[in-house]
Amino acid sequence: MIRNEAEYQEASQRLAQESLRLAEHRARLKEAGLGHEEIKRVIDPIESFHLQLQEEVEAYERLKRGEFAELDDLRAVGHLLITSRIAQGISQRELARRLGAHESQVSRDERNEYFGITLERAAKILDVLNVRLHTKIAIEPLPPAPVAQAS
């Protein structure tokens, strides 16, 4: 996941370079006489990485536009905290300042996607980012209990 503008710039440049390199590699393989299936076997892993990087760049761009995915459960709260900061254009340094914490702590927390964060700390981060959550509860039926077998 791209977490800041520097990472975004680096990923965008790398994506452009990889596009050129991929096209050149494909052309060299074709010149070497490899068939379509052979080229595909060689190119697929490289192309897969390229597509993953492209998805990350596009996801960051959506966040910068304020487009959020829905939060289905509390396991994704760390991702929500990071995306809320990015969408507002707030740096990790600025978030740390607002929290009264060290930038290295925010960086470390975000690298771990705030795994194990307390609700109190999550609420404090949401408060300093001025983010308000609106909940919609859906209680789904429990699966039937397994039937015990007699011995």
Image: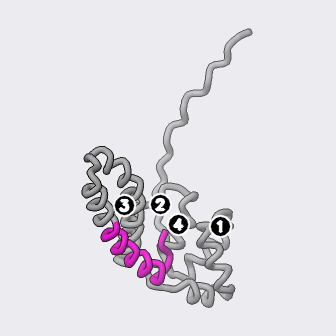
Report how far apart the C-alphas of labels 3 and 4 lie in the structure. 21 Å
- The residue carrying pointer 3 sits among few (fewer than 14), some (14 to 19) or many (20 or more) residues within 10 Å by Cα, namely few
Q: Tell me, yes or no, whether the two marked residues, 2 and 4, touch with CB atoms within 8 Å.
A: no
| Label 3 element class | helix
Kind of residue sitting beneath label 2: Leu
Q: Which numbered tag is attached to residue 71?
A: 2
> Is residue 149 something one can see in this rendering?
yes
Q: Mark 1 points at which residue?
A: 119
Q: Mark 3 points at which residue?
A: 51
Q: Tell me, yes or no, whether the two marked residues, 3 and 2, touch with CB atoms within 8 Å.
A: no
- The residue carrying pointer 1 sits among few (fewer than 14), some (14 to 19) or many (20 or more) residues within 10 Å by Cα, namely few
Q: Mark 4 points at which residue?
A: 79
Kind of residue sitting beneath label 3: Leu
Of the residues under marks 2 and 4, which one precedes in the sequence?
2
Of the residues under marks 4 and 1, which one precedes in the sequence?
4
- The residue carrying pointer 2 sits among few (fewer than 14), some (14 to 19) or many (20 or more) residues within 10 Å by Cα, namely few
Q: Tell me, yes or no, whether the two marked residues, 3 and 4, touch with CB atoms within 8 Å.
A: no
Q: Is residue 59 magenta?
A: no
